Image (cartoon, grey):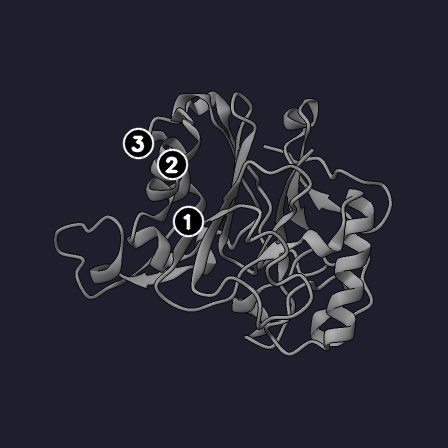
Amino acid sequence: MTVRISKKIDPIWEDWPELRNFSFLHGVTERVGGCSSGEYASLNCDFEGGDTAFSVLENRRRLCAALACDPLNITTTGTGEPGHIVVVGEAERGAGAGDYFCALKRTKALMTDLRDTPLFMFAADAVPLILFDAQHHACAVVTADIPELKSRLVSSVLFAMNIIYGSRPEELFAYIGPAASEEYVTVNVADALMKKQGEIGLTVHVNMKEAVERELKQGGVDSQHIFVSNSCTYKERERFFSLRRQGIYCGRNTVFALLL
């Protein structure tokens, strides 16, 4: 399955073209179009990883200019466990826009029905998942690596959207973005999602995108409403950052959603 690049100018990102018919912007950014250097070159919008604050803020400004939104409304997250799901309302809007310390800590998913409120999360091999409810004009942004797949975070987000916004899974659109492909993701079978008899203790490869897609379908999302990117963050070094390839001191790909 091929994926279109949404812009001919910098910065650029991947998205699902079918969702461009709605008042909704979404995608996963690529590396070009920013001002950062070295392992952060060039469009790194995350304060974590060691980049300078000046570069991060300038990169955020450039991305928001391309999205035609106010960078002061950026709402983003920080790392840590447990991974909360945060409903972004007026009080949360702008959390983390200007520095790391004001971001929503210990958060693995953001959801909102507010317009002009860009949700930013960051990934560099984890699976980016963007959910959009056209009926209730709501969206969610999720990043899922092995721990989140084990805890079935995706199912929890589907449940939360149903409770908060009345979103029905069969009406949701789901975009699964660029992530590390199966050959670069290994786990011990004791921690794997699907254990097979006789394999305990062995190392196996996990297709994280497929696992997210499977969880979406199990949660009731229509297979025709799911788009899976065929891009690999590990292999495509010119396009994406990758923790597994570069180590922790590197940039992050921005996963964003914006209701218009």
- Please state, as top left, top right, bottom left or bottom right, where the N terminus lies in the image: top right
Which disc number belongs to residue 104? none
What is the residue that sits farthest to the front in this orientation? 91
Which disc number belongs to residue 208? 1
Label pair 3/1, CB-CB below 8 angstroms: no
Tag 1: amino acid: Met
What residue sits right under mark 3 in the picture?
218
Residue 96 is situated, as x and y percent measured from the top left of the image, at 61, 63
For residue 215, above or below residue 185:
above
Q: Nearer the viewer, residue 214 or 219?
A: 219
For residue 120, above or below residue 106:
above
Tag 3: amino acid: Gln
Looking at the image, which residue is at 55% across and 52% down? 91
Residue 157 is situated, as x and y percent measured from the top left of the image, at 39, 42
Specify which label sits upstream in the sequence, 3 or 1.
Answer: 1
Tell me the distance, in whole angstroms, between the alpha carbons under discs 2 and 3: 11 Å
Tag 2: amino acid: Leu
Label pair 2/1, CB-CB below 8 angstroms: no
Q: Residues within 10 Å of mark 2 (few under 14, many from 20)?
A: many
What residue sits right under mark 2 in the picture?
158
Residue 78 is situated, as x and y percent measured from the top left of the image, at 51, 66
Q: Is residue 32 visible?
A: no
Tell me the distance, in whole angstroms, between the alpha carbons under discs 2 and 1: 18 Å
Specify which label sits upstream in the sequence, 2 or 1.
Answer: 2
